[in-house]
Amino acid sequence: MKDTQVLVVGGGPAGLMAALAASNLGACVTLIDRQETLGGQLIKQTHKFFGTYKEQAGVRGIDIATRLSEEIKSSENGNLKTIQGGEVVAFYPDCTIIYSHNQTLKKIRYDRVIFATGASERMLLFPGNDLPGVYAAGAIQTLMNVNGVLPGDTYLMVGAGNIGLIVSYQLLQAGARVICVLDAMPKIGGYLVHASKIRRMGIPIYLRHTILEARGENKVEEAVITALDNNLRPVPGTEKVLKVDVISLAVGLNPLGELLEQCGLKFVYIPELGGFVPFHDEFMRTSRKEIFVVGDLAGVEEATTAMLQGRLAGLVAAQDIGYIRDGVDREIERILESLSKYRAGPKSFKIKEGISKLKTNDKQSVIEGFKYA
Amino acid sequence: MKRILKHPILNFPRRKIISFTFNGKELSGFEGDTIASALISYGIYNFHTSIKLKRPRGFFCVIGNCSSCLMEVDGMPNVRICVTPLREGMKIHTQEGKGIF
């Protein structure tokens, strides 16, 4: 006996859309999330989204989270069940997961599972990087935008991608001081709109620069930065010492795939997608037909595409079980079109490269049945 | 204090006060705080010491992924304080290494 038809692990933008799409088609859906509030990382994103109006462009992330959670709550009495504060801790190949909830372990058996576990922020290697005061940019964003607390006064931002730029601006909004933004690359990685906003506030962005060292007794007191040459090697004599109490790292994310590694799923290593990602087709189905991956777990990108991927996998999973309705195939086609339209911009070059590597994965370092020894 | 009082987009209304202790000292936070955000609002950034070299450890990810913020809460070690809601009367202690069960 199965407990649910479609299980969704993770209640961020991708997971919420997957749960809604599958339950709207009629499937019995269980959505499990380890936090007390739904929305994943949307709950700290106070900036407005880009893209097309249909995909909620112009709406702040925090408002999208509220909208989607309300939609989930209103379908909860029907065929959609949510488990909040439940963390999936084990995953077995016979369509079973174990989760921990209120300090007890419980089991769920399913027909289809959609994983939307997201990604975790990367660390950078430099002496002193373990000192309190070296924080992930997303961590600072959570503290200031969800809890209303600033973990320091003076900040150095490492990384000029979208997260680095957006969090710098939001730090200024919260009343903090940002000394500068560094990036090892010769070009700004994020959208120029975000870069212009912080430049207008007088915050310099130093390209071809990186951090050499964090100094301090029990906490960050100083950061040593340097210029880099064309081969990304530090240029001697260009070191500068900055008085900061927080070094914020915005140097990319890694997909959170540990759970899926437990059941021998095929993984591929694609740097453009964030590293090891579960192999999947364009409908987000993995090497096992009952398992789907969506959102940052399938390749680090952003919330708009995560929501589209979630809807896609939700519809396909419900169809698998037999919830076939007129017009769904057309809707699936439209989602695929929206995804490629959204990725048409120059900033999506890397993602497109990564996805094309996924399609022709024979040259990649494919790891089958990747497991902990 | 490092609470944000003025913000162009968000507002943080005054919420119910929650009392707790940190290494025996009486402190207070607000409803909606995690243990981490309450401690950080007091400028407390040192949550545990590393296992081998006894280096200070603060938070890193604040979303429950990295295990950098483990502390002893009500006698239980290895609690991820960044995702644990603050509750009335909690006894929070700095954790040494792996903690004491």
Image (cartoon, helix red, strand yellow):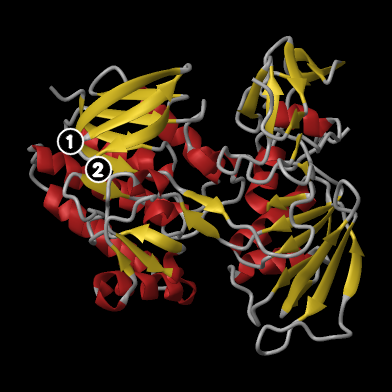
Using the image, name the chain to which the residue with label 1 belongs: A
Q: Chain of mark 2?
A: A
Residue at horizontal 67%, vertical 83%? A232
Q: Which of label 1 and label 2 is nearer to you?
A: 2
Among the 4 quarters of the image, the one containing residue B32:
top right
Are the residues flagged by discs 1 and 2 in contact, CB closer than 8 Å?
A: yes
Percent position (x, y) of residue A169?
72, 56
Judge whether residue A53 can be spotted in this image.
Answer: no
Q: Which mark is residue A314?
A: 2
Query: Which picture quadrant has residue A90?
Result: top left
User: Which quadrant, please, contains the N terminus of chain B?
Assistant: top right
Residue at label 1? A25
Q: Position of residue A84 (x, y in %)?
A: 44, 24
Q: Residue furthest top?
A: B89
Residue A49 in the image: state x and y as whole percent: 52, 54
Q: Amino acid at mark 2?
A: Gly
The C terminus of chain B sits in image quarter: top right
Query: Where does residue B94 sit, x and y in percent of width and height?
Result: 78, 28
Q: Amino acid at mark 1?
A: Leu
Whether residue A236 is visible, yes or no, is: yes
Residue at image location 66% in from the left, 29% down from the top: B81
Q: Nearer the viewer, residue A366 or A334?
A: A366
Q: Residues within 10 Å of mark 1 (few under 14, many from 20)?
A: some
A186 w.r.t. A347: above or below? below
Q: Are marks 1 and 2 on the same chain?
A: yes
Q: Nearer the viewer, residue B76 or A123?
A: B76
Which secondary structure, mark 2? Answer: helix
Residue drawn at point x = 34 percent, y = 72 percent: A365
Q: How many marks?
A: 2
Q: Is residue B6 above or below residue A271?
A: above
Q: Earlier in the sequence, mark 1 or mark 2?
A: 1
